[in-house]
């Protein structure tokens, strides 16, 4: 189906929270994959299906070990886990040091994720620019979405990133509910001279993020985070369905011959 790469232009303004929120309300079968070479934190932030913790050794790390012999889309689900609520996730690396021996992985991983036949993939790629090898994963994505805020420093980094990326991208503004539409309109005006496929918003909602991670009880589906995530998910899913796929056919991808050194519950519909 489709591979959608979610990334930040500066720091990481809620990309992981956004990925899980979008996954929780996605209109099709979906997998959330932590693809940040700096390391992920789903294993430490969100509870597993059984109420315990995710296994940090099962995910990108275990997939990388078998991918040296070739990577096929059908192998990926052997390394996924489920969050409370049933969301499938591919847990990321525990830290950036683990990525040192996996610099070759990102291209084959991107092509395999893009060729998964039964699910869309939301890939949390963290901050762009820190690890150039993730460009190989982005090249396989059907859509790249940059998350930003309506502040001077984030806007400056966003403009720089749009100049460097040689493809259309979507932009999502993490916006204060008090100035939600105004923030989105301001970013839309700023990026009007770049090749931007859409500009949308997601509410900055710390309380909703706590609900998503199971830190306290309440109606998750009533939170601003989930309400705006639902709008964004519908728009993004419709957008990628309307554009030609950049994904590769589901064939094995050979790995290098040599080894290199070395929760979130779903809301009710």
Image: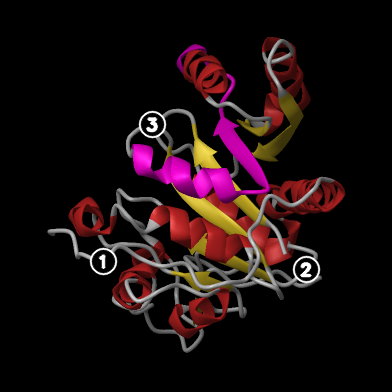
Above or below 15: residue 95: below
- Residue positioned 57% across, 35% down in the render: 147
Q: Earlier in the sequence, mark 1 or mark 2?
A: 2
Residue toward you, 113 or 4: 113
Q: What is the secondary structure assignment of the residue under circle 1? A: loop
Above or below 190: residue 242: below
Location of the N terminus by quadrant is: bottom right
Q: Which residues are magenta?
A: 132-153
Where residue 223 sits, quadrant-wise, is bottom right
Q: Any magenta on residue 209?
A: no
Give percent across and percent down for residue 174.
61, 34
In the drawing, does residue 139 fall left or right of residue 171? Answer: left
What whole-number distance in Å separates the C-alpha atoms at marks 1 and 2? 37 Å
Quick one: label 2, few (<14), some, or many (20+) residues within 10 Å? some
- Residue positioned 69% across, 21% down in the render: 183
**Label of residue 28 in the image:** 2
Q: Earlier in the sequence, mark 3 or mark 1?
A: 3
Location of the C terminus by quadrant is: bottom right
- Residue positioned 20% across, 64% down in the render: 258
Residue toward you, 259 or 92: 259
What whole-number distance in Å separates the C-alpha atoms at marks 3 and 1? 27 Å
Give percent across and percent down for residue 134.
41, 45
Q: What is the secondary structure assignment of the residue under circle 3? A: loop
The residue that disc 3 covers is: 129
In the drawing, does residue 67 fall left or right of residue 187? Answer: left
């Amino acid at each position: 189906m489709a591979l959608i790469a979610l990334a930040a232009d500066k720091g990481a303004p809620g990309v992981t929270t956004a990925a899980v929120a979008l996954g929780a309300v996605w209109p099709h079968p979906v997998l959330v994959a932590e693809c940040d070479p700096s390391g992920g934190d789903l294993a430490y932030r969100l509870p597993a299906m059984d109420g315990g913790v995710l296994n940090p050794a099962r995910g990108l790390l275990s997939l990388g070990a078998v991918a040296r012999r070739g990577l096929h889309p059908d192998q990926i689900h052997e390394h996924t886990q489920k969050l409370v609520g049933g969301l499938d996730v591919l847990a990321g690396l525990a830290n950036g040091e683990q990525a040192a021996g996996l610099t070759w992985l990102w291209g084959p991983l991107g092509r395999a994720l893009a060729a998964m036949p039964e699910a869309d993939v939301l890939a949390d790629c963290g901050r762009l620019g820190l690890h150039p090898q993730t460009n190989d994963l982005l090249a396989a994505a059907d859509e790249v979405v940059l998350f930003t805020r309506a502040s001077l420093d984030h806007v400056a980094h966003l403009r720089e990133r749009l100049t460097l990326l040689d493809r259309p991208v979507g932009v999502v503004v993490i916006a204060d509910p008090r100035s939600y539409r105004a923030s989105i309109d301001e970013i839309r005006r700023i990026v009007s001279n770049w090749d931007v496929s859409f500009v949308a918003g997601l509410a900055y909602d710390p309380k909703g993020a706590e609900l998503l991670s199971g830190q306290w009880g309440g109606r998750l589906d009533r939170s601003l985070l989930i309400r705006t995530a639902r709008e964004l998910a519908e728009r993004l899913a419709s957008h990628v369905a309307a554009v030609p796929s950049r994904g590769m056919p589901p064939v094995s991808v050979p790995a290098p011959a040599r080894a290199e050194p070395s929760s979130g519950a779903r809301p009710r519909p």
